Image: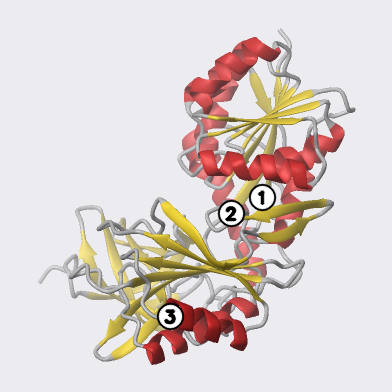
Amino acid sequence: MSSWRVGAEHELKITGLSHEGSGVGRLNNRVVFVPQTIPGDRARVRLVHVKERLAYGELLAILEPSPDRRTPSCPHAPLCGGCQLQHMAYPAQLRWKRQQVLDALERLGGLEVEVRPTIGMEYPYHYRNKAQLPLGRRKERLVMGFFQRGSHEIVDMSSCEIQHPSITRLALAVKRAVQELGIEPYDEVRHTGVLRHAVIRVSFSHGKLMLILVTRTRDLPRGEELIARLSREVPELSSVAQNINPQVTNVILGRETKILWGSEYLLDTIGHMSYAVSPTSFFQVNPVQTKVLYDLVRDSLPLTGGETVLDLYCGAGTIGLYLAARAGRVIGVEAVAPAVDDARRNAQLNGITNAEFYTGRAEEVLPGLIKKYRAVDGAVVDPPRKGCDPVVLEALAKVGVPTLVYVSCNPATLARDLNYLAGLGYTAGAIQPVDMFPWTSHVECVVLMSKVEK
């Protein structure tokens, strides 16, 4: 009987990690991906999905543990999809994240660029300021937590190693109240019920909490009772909003959001800056490492006080505003209109008058801005995981922007775009990985690109 089939069991030596955090082993020169394993493990594995040259396996037993293996302190670690590397020692995670960047550069970028050691956290726990928690029903019991890895089964959360403790406390209070008030959770199979998600945000600097109740319906039964109860049980709660999402979709938030009680936004600080965070604002989820990241961006650009700096894919303007004190003018561009509103509010909040923000896709807005402002001395790009549109990079090169700081959350698209920029006359400095998401497979990078003089 073939050993390369679903259900076959094998002993594997794990020699690598995929970019998603699964261990990688080989069986007769074919690759097998195994979640919950790390390099150095010898494991018993059952194949659960088989293709011609690769397969996916499930871990049956660790026969010999890697020196870098640890026992997860989170009781949900084996199932929960929130973390992929709870079983890997933290120093080993930092080494692997650097290697992930090196591998992407070599494989996808064809570049030889220095990659510095990953900057980690002194205390890599309870760092997240935002949680998005689906609700559902298992038999007659309400469940609320995170999706199980690779599925839409909800892992019923009792604690979390990476969320701020106040988030967990409010989440458990929401779950009790929803259960006792009889508010029906969403059923994604039948598309029935009311409450889809509880999104919780916390201000690290002020300790205040915001709750966004994502509902399928415009009506929120017993909503006033729910808010009254939660505000008594969790005094730090300062804002409750409702987001209405009637669509059959995996997207969490719908288009309409309204404040039901309390403040319109949370205030938080990163370094010297204050930021107003509204229910749908993008805001980095790890404020401790965000300061590290923003300091790297600021210190990479040679700013003396008179420069014009572009901030592309600027979101709520957090990076551009962080640079404003050292620049002559900051010009931000963002496709999401509410984020631009947040950016302008944040400029006003901090008394910043040398920052302007424009709504639109960077590739469409940028040529007109370059024509309007002519000389651009530097730029920051912080694109989504898919990376930069080539039109954006070409426009920056065409006008001869001398320095460009690229902030990336995806080593693969970073490598691709650095290769493209090299063809446009830019050379890369050292890449600095920053661990924004301990215990997960994600890594953020900052790199300065300089225009080569011909």
Q: In which quarter of the image is residue 374?
A: top right
Q: Nearer the viewer, residue 8 or 432?
A: 432
Q: Quadrant of the C terminus?
A: top right
Q: Nearer the viewer, residue 219 or 105?
A: 219
Mark 3 vs mark 1, CA separation in Å: 27 Å
- The numbered dot on residue 433 is 1
Using the image, determine if residue 290 lies above or below residue 183: above
> Where residue 336 appears, x then y in whole percent?
50, 39
Using the image, determine if residue 349 lies above or below residue 26: above
Q: Is residue 392 left or right of residue 451?
A: left
Mark 1 vs mark 2, CA separation in Å: 7 Å
- Residue carrying label 3: 78
Q: In which quarter of the image is the N terminus?
A: bottom left
Residue 424 in sight here: no
Label pair 3/1, CB-CB below 8 angstroms: no
- Residue carrying label 2: 443
Q: How crowded is mark 2: few (under 14 residues within 10 Å), some or many (20 or more)?
A: many
Three-letter code for the amino acid on which mark 3 is drawn: Pro
Report the residue at 66% width, 50% height from top. Answer: 433
Label pair 1/2, CB-CB below 8 angstroms: yes
- Count of numbered marks: 3
> Where residue 359 appears, x then y in whole percent?
55, 31
Q: Residue furthest right?
A: 304
Report the residue at 83% width, 26% height from top. Answer: 328
> Where residue 285 appears, x then y in whole percent?
61, 60
Q: Nearer the viewer, residue 80 or 219?
A: 219
Q: Quadrant of residue 383?
A: top right
Report the residue at 69% width, 44% height from top. Answer: 345
Three-letter code for the amino acid on which mark 2 is drawn: Val
